[in-house]
Image (cartoon, coloured by chain):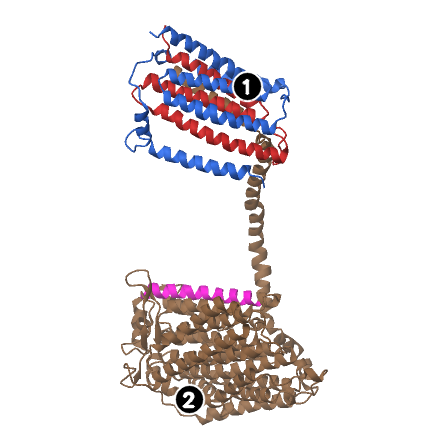
Amino acid sequence: MDLTLFMYLIPSLIMFGCGVYGFITRKNMIAIMISLELMLNSVDINFVVFNRYLFPGQLEGMFFSLFAIAIAAAETALAIAIIINVFRIAKNVDIKQITKLKF
Amino acid sequence: MPLSLAIVVVALPLLMFLFLGLVGVKMGRKITGVIGVIAMLVDTVLAYGVALTYFFGSGEGQMVDGVRQAVVVANPAWLSFTDTLVVRMGVLVDPIAAMMLVVITTVSLMVHLYSLGYMSDHDGNAEKGFQRYYAFLALFTFSMLGLVVATNIFQIFIFFEMVGLSSYLLIGFYYSTPAANHANKKAFIVTRLADLFFLLGIMILSYYTGTFDFDKLVFGPTMSGSLETAQSAISTAGGATFMGCSVMAWALTFIFIGGAGKSAMYPLHIWLPDAMEGPTPVSALIHAATMVVAGVFLVARLFPLYVLVQGAMNIILVVGAFTAFYAAAIACTQSDIKRALAFSTISQIAFMMTSLAVSSNNNALIEIHEGQGLGYMASMFHLFTHAMFKALLFLCAGAIIHAVHSNENSKMHGLHKFMPITSICFLIGCLAIAGIPPFAGFWSKDEILVAAYHRGLGWGLWMSMVACMTAFYMFRIYYLIFFWKKHEVHDEHHAPKDQVWTMTLPLIILAVISCVAGFVPFHNMVTWDGHHLHTAIDWTVAGSSVAVALVGIGLATVMYYKENPLPERMANAMRGLWTASYKRFYMDELYQFITHKVIFQTLCVPIAWFDRHIIDGFFNLLADTTNSVSYGIRRLQSGSIQAYVFIYLLGALLLAAITAVCVMLF
Amino acid sequence: MESVGNIILYFIVAIAIIVFSVLTVTTRKILRSATYLLFVLFATAIIYFQMDYEFLGAVQIAVYAGGILVLFVFAIMLTHRPGHDAEALTSHRRWLGLTAALAGVGVCGYALFSYADFAGKVITSGSTFDMVQIGRFLLSTDKYGYLLPFEAISVLLLACIIGGVVIARRR
């Protein structure tokens, strides 16, 4: 039995679906961030797997994932800084209740 | 002194305008005024230097075979339309330009000095906007100087607009009073309308002759007025005609209309009396001495062309002669002294126009070569003397107004005891304008009358009658201000008195000039073709003109020296005429009727309705639709990122699905 | 033909990813959610190791599992009282989320199945790259060199550090 490209893409796809579900349903901002990380991660897997299976002599996908991880780290750090700041002001991290700036 | 200093004469006021306008606010009010006066003094000295050098110096071929030449000091190209049609911005010094340099700088200097006192309250504190006032004065002086030294007709047009602008700014100097705003708009619109014709005239002229430059239009090979050059310019146009008249006649008539707008000829005079809303020194400078003679100057500049196009010249003659009488008739009844003086100005400018127009007749070529350019010389002479004594009269009026805080002569009466210097200066001005020898006006007006009699007895008698009216209304104003009855003083502390020296000194200087200006040998200096003109006083004309002036003065003395019921009785006897004159023969009402009732009602109201309801309605509809639609769909912009993601994802998937289906099908 | 160990490892990893992903987004305790995410990230790292990308796997563990997740845990500690569960989802929201997720999975899955030819590709024992080569690629300006994005990322990280400090600092 071979480990085909297909077999790696399936878990990745499910992971992405979970991310979407979480992003849409969660109310807690941190939980939303976690769902976002899931989606990012599944995309990273795709890059790497495609790179390894289809273009084994090159490293583009791998580097792309590398940079994506770095950017994800930066983005998460910033997002959490914002979340903590919002929490200080609103005493809450529930996006349904932070509505001060809405029309 | 080199003639090229004329460039400095023109440029210095511009620099002062920029300096005072940009830096003035940072400096004290008085300081700006003093700087303005000093700069103007320097400018005046330079202008006198240039004029003296030009008239009496011997350099640079100014005199060739006894003909005084025009000297082009600088003439750089400014706008090149085609290879042949180039607009230049130059400095040209010829007799009338040199004379105008003197007139403008002198009056401007006097007004600059006078304004130091006039634009201050009685404690000597300068008014608000003092710097702006001086900056605008400098701008006006620059524009007027640029106009007179122009080397081509397009340059004249540009500076025509600029004097109009500075006049607008200065009339509206007290921009918080509605009357001043109305007056400056009126002045601007009327003169702009006239300038439109001027521009049309320039276009026609330059289209048919292929040039803007005076040296190709009116100056001969010796750079002095030449009928041959004018003849060749006209023949360049060929025999082109429009509606039965030659195109040159149209062009020159249109150009005259432009000049008539600035010079307040009937029926375009209506702006000038209203322009008296501006500060009085401004009226003295712009609306008595300099800007309003721009039209006369323009006709004088193109004189050889006008001589050859007799049709245009006849229009000038009729308009000038009628305006002279019309304005004099109105001046006889006005109670506001500035307005009375304004109508006097109109009348006197009309004198100049008439004088230009009578200096040729139908066999012009022969006449004028026999040395009959007398009218031209007389016109320029009168322009010169009139500028001086009318500026004097206006400045006196300003001093009186400053003292009694009113323009109405009913508030003045009997000021002779209180303001002796002003009274004497005003008297000198009146004598000068009435034409009593040896004051300036006599000499110039006498020349005009001689020229008019030369043209025809009717014209001469007509102008003599106007001269008589001039003497009458001027002395009427004089007596009503300084005599009539004892002045009532309510408060000893604020009794009217002669004003501060900055205001009195210009009066004295101008009075002296008015006494002696008549002895300037104009016939040797300012002639249309540069030749000397041999004139002698024609004593029959001179005697009769003095006689009619004395009649006018005598009549005024009888009626207005002491308070008496005679004027009232005469006014009642000719009630209709008197009221018509007092109401300026209803010209303003006529304009009002034409613009409001005819043009506005029939043309503008429907257009405005169309604009307001159809054009605006269309755009309002667009805006309202956008507004209501946005209001309706604003809930889509919920700010919920999760909703956005959901919709975005569905959209992306839909797109993917559609693509997939398309790929499968095709 | 893969080694049996590899296949077993794959299945463990795949099942772990699927199960923990689902748990991450369904649990009502936020700290547990973070923990499940940690497991998913570890499983992903194992996939990278399987692909012979050891460096990427190491980065995944160090940065994601070690850095980001710690951040999450800190944030959760700062903003949540212990033992406080998220309230139950309304069925409306759940259906919305399910629709979106399932539609996405459906479309993408269909795409995968319809491209079976390359989806069925087998791994080739191609050349693998060691750390030295990766380092050279990262700092090279030649073809396949990544100096520019590398520098851009460094600047981005710097900006994020400053931004984070500015935003979170107590005023």
B13 is higher (above) or lower (below) than B382: above
Quadrant assignment, res B142: bottom left
**Chain identity of mark 2:** B
- 10 Å neighbourhood of mark 2: few (<14), some, or many (≥20)? few
- Measured in 3D between alpha carbons, the distance from the residue under mark 2 to the one under mark 1, in whole angstroms, is 108 Å
Which numbered disc, 2 or 1, marks the residue closer to the eye? 1
Image side of residue B413 versus residue A12, left or right: right
What is the secondary structure assignment of the residue under circle 2? Answer: loop
From the top left corner, tell me how far across and down residue B10 is, in percent.
Answer: 40, 74
Chief SS of the magenta region: helix
Does the magenta portion include B43? no
Q: Residue at x 63, y 77 (%)?
A: B407
- 10 Å neighbourhood of mark 1: few (<14), some, or many (≥20)? many
Amino acid residing under circle 2: Val
Quadrant assignment, res B240: bottom left
**Chain identity of mark 1:** C
Read off the magenta span: B183-209
Q: Which residue is mark 2?
A: B520
Q: Give the colour in which the image draws chain A.
A: red
From the top left corner, tell me how far across and down residue B550 is, in percent.
Answer: 56, 91
Name the foreground residue: C16 vs B377.
C16
> Does the rendering let one see residue C131?
yes
